[in-house]
Amino acid sequence: MKPYENRYWTSDDEVRLHYRDYPGREDRPPILCLPGLTRNARDYEDLAERLAGGWRVITVDFRGRGESGPAKDPMSYMPMTYVRDIELLIDQLGCERIVSFGTSLGGIVTMLLAATRPGVLAGALLNDVGPEIEPAGLGRIRSYVGKANTWPTWMHAARGVQEGNADVYPNYGVEDWLAMAKRLYRLNSSGRIVLDYDMKIAEPFRVPGNETGADLWPVFDALKKVPTLIVRGGRSDVFGAETAKRMLARLDRAALATVRDVGHAPTLSEPEAAAAIDHLLATVTKEPVAA
C-alpha cells in the first residue's frame, strides 16, 4: 500500500495538476514540497516518508512534469504561473498557513509566494537557491534543459545520469544513480526510458531575463519574519556562498545548513539537512496559530 494518495487540482487555464498527499497531523500546517526545474514530486519521496504522520506532506508536480498535464501555452512555463497554480492548490486545500519546501525553481516559487500571499507561510526552506543565481550554474542548466534523450534500460539511464552529475554527487554508488534515474525518467509506451517532463519547459527559460524574472531581493525580503532554513550544497555552482551570507543578514529568523560534498542540489535526506529541517519544524510548531 502506498504511503500517499494521488490527488489533482486544475489551473486557471485548465491544466490538470497532480500532487502526492502524505497524511499527517491536522493541527499543524501542511508541508508543500516544490521541486526544481526539470524535477517532480518523486524527488521528495524519502523526505515525505520520513516526515509523514507527524506532518501532512504534499509533494507537487509543476505543470508539464511528472503526472501533471503539459501547458497549453509553453510561455506559461514561468515562475509567476507556477505561483498562481500553487495558490489555487492552497485554496483547494483550505489552508490558512503552510510550510513551503522549495528546491531551486521551487525555492523561487516559495519566495514569490511569500510576497504574493503575506502571512501564508508558517515556515520556509530554500534548497540551494537564492535571489541570485551563479552564471556558471545557470549556463550548465541551459546546456541540458529541454534536450531529450532516451535509454533502453534503467541501468543505461543510471549511467547517463552519472555521467552528467558525477561532480554534483561525488560519493554516489550504483544504487544511488539508479534511484536518481527513476526520479528523473519514466517508461514510455514504446518501452524506452525518457525524461519525465515536457521538453517545451525550456522555451521561456531560454529567453534572456526569464530565468527568474525581475530582481528577487525585494521578493526575498517578504520572508523577513518567517522561520526560514537555507540549505546550500557545498559544491553548488548555482547558489553561491556569498549570496547565502547576504540572505542570512537580511532575515530575522533564518538559519543556514551547508551539505558538504554535494552540488546542486541536496536531496534533503543528508544528515546535515535532515537535522536542520527537524529544527525548523520544531520552531514552526511553537508559532502562534494566527498569522
Image: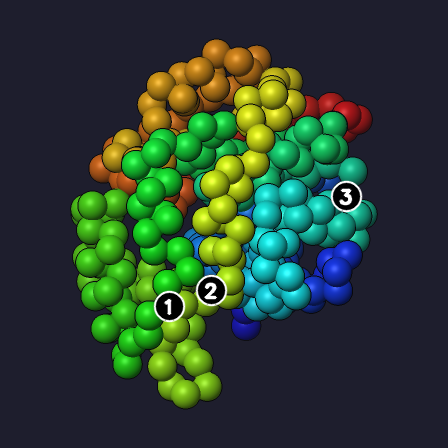
Q: Nearer the viewer, mark 3 or mark 1?
A: 1
Closest to the observer: 265 or 206?
Answer: 206
- The reply to whether dot 1 and dot 2 touch (C-beta < 8 Å) is yes
Q: Would residue 182 be seen by someone viewing this image from the given angle? A: no
In the figure, 225 relative to 169: above or below? Answer: above
Q: SS at mark 3?
A: loop
Label for residue 148? Answer: 1
Sequence-wise, the earlier of marks 3 and 1 is: 3
Q: Quadrant of the C terminus?
A: top right
Q: Amino acid at mark 1?
A: Ala
Q: Which residue is mark 2?
A: 199
User: How many residues crowd mark 2 within 10 Å: few (<14), some (14–19), many (20+)?
Assistant: some
Nearer the N terminus, badge 2 or badge 3? 3
Q: Residue at x 74, y 28 (%)?
A: 118
Which residue type carries mark 2? Answer: Met
Task: Tell me the residue at 46%/86% (across/down).
Answer: 189
Between 2 and 273, the one nearer to me in the picture = 273
Alpha-carbon distance for marks 3 and 1?
38 Å
Residue 20 x/y as whole percent: 60, 60
* Mark positioned earlier in the residue sequence (1 or 2): 1
Question: Measured from the top left, where is residue 198 in percent x and y?
Answer: 51, 65
Q: Which mark is residue 95?
A: 3
Give the quarter of the figure containing the N terminus.
bottom right
| Residue at the limit of the structure toward the front, as seen here | 208
**Count of labels in the image:** 3
Where is residue 284 shown, x and y percent of the image? 62, 29
Spot the residue most to the bottom.
190
User: Image height check: is 110 above or below 269?
Assistant: above
* Secondary structure type for disc 2: helix
Amino acid type indicated by mark 3: Cys
Decide if residue 99 is on the left or right side of residue 266: right
Q: Residue at x 51, y 62 (%)?
A: 200
